[in-house]
Amino acid sequence: MQRFGTLSFGHYGPLGGGRELTAGDNLHQAIDLAQGMDEIGVDGTYFRVHHFARQHSSPMPLLAAIAAKTERIEMGTGVIDMRYENPLYLAEEAAAVDLISDGRIALGVSRGSPETVVRGYEAFGYTGSSDPRGADIARDHFDTFLRAIEGEPMADRDPSSSFGGGGQGRQRVEPYSPGLRSRIWWGAGSHDSAAWAGRIGVNLMSSTLLTEDLGMPFDELQASQLETFRAAWREAGHSGEPRTSVSRSVFPITTAQDRMFFGHSQENDGVGYIDGLRSTFGRTYAAEPDVLIEQLRQDAAVQSADTLMLTIPSQMGVEFNLHIVESFAAHVAPALGWTPTTAR
């Protein structure tokens, strides 16, 4: 494990007892937590993206705010649902955040996760899919997005324009950020999608759930997926080493409050059906630090990936989530090979 960070779903709404976490509270707390983690040397802060739900939905303003208020931490998504995206506008926004952050973006994209509405992407104007889950729209949008951030010209210049156009030929979208493509990740939920990501040469975020059940533990299934990805990357002839990440719910129990909240968390993998597909879910780790170290050393996917994303209960506030992260950084991560960014 070379890097670790947090993955936040960004839930907000009623908290019980008459308390309410607003969307504004949620966004400001995400910025504050990122600043706190930046100071202690955590590598990254990443955000799930869900539409029509009380969760993070428009990540770019949040990532830009974090980029402007931090120095070292990577900020990104896990993942943006490409069914909902205008690919050229996303290319402009991604390049802008990458430039503001001096290359600290890690943009995870994919088809997206199960929705709270029926084909919500159609309400955003993206219709005509021949796939009941809109996967064809997502792939088409992603292809256009990649071509745009690579600097491919996307529109004809207007030779008669008096607003800075002119000339002949075609024009790329602006701003353009060199190297941005190397910071793009595909969120894969199966061996097939992982192999596809390897072939086209983007990094891999292995999903929090896999839409397949091959009769093996979740960590081994993920590790197999990562190896499939790396094999496809090598076979395609891409240079360098791709990055890979997995996410886990990991709670070091160091206080009585930790034990109260997490002492009875799930300890086994789960199997169920998502979008009509038999799917596998990962377990939650909650134990004293020395126990967690041994458990994570036995987790095949954690050992295989270079980046571990800790899913955090963001609705519990900045102070408590920073406590979780600090406990992991102080008592668990170093035994797994990690060093803080402040010491590199």
Image (spheres, rainbow, N blue to C red):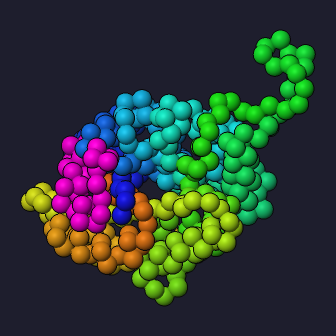
Mostly what secondary structure, the magenta segment?
helix
Q: Is residue 282 positioned above or below 182 on the image? A: below
Residue 288 can be seen in this image? yes
- Outermost residue on the left side: it is 256
Residue pictured at 48% horizontal, 88% vertical: 215
Residue 261 can be seen in this image? no
- Outermost residue on the top side: it is 162
Q: Quadrant of the N terminus?
A: bottom left
Residue 159 in the image: state x and y as whole percent: 90, 20
Residue pictured at 50% horizontal, 30% vertical: 100
Q: Which residues are magenta?
A: 317-344
Q: Is residue 123 positioned above or below 202 on the image? A: above
Residue 161 in the image: state x and y as whole percent: 86, 16
Residue 114 in the image: state x and y as whole percent: 55, 61
Residue pictured at 77% horizontal, 41% vertical: 152
Q: Is residue 231 positioned above or below 42 on the image? A: below
Residue pictured at 65% horizontal, 34% vertical: 176
Check residue 330 for magenta coloring. yes
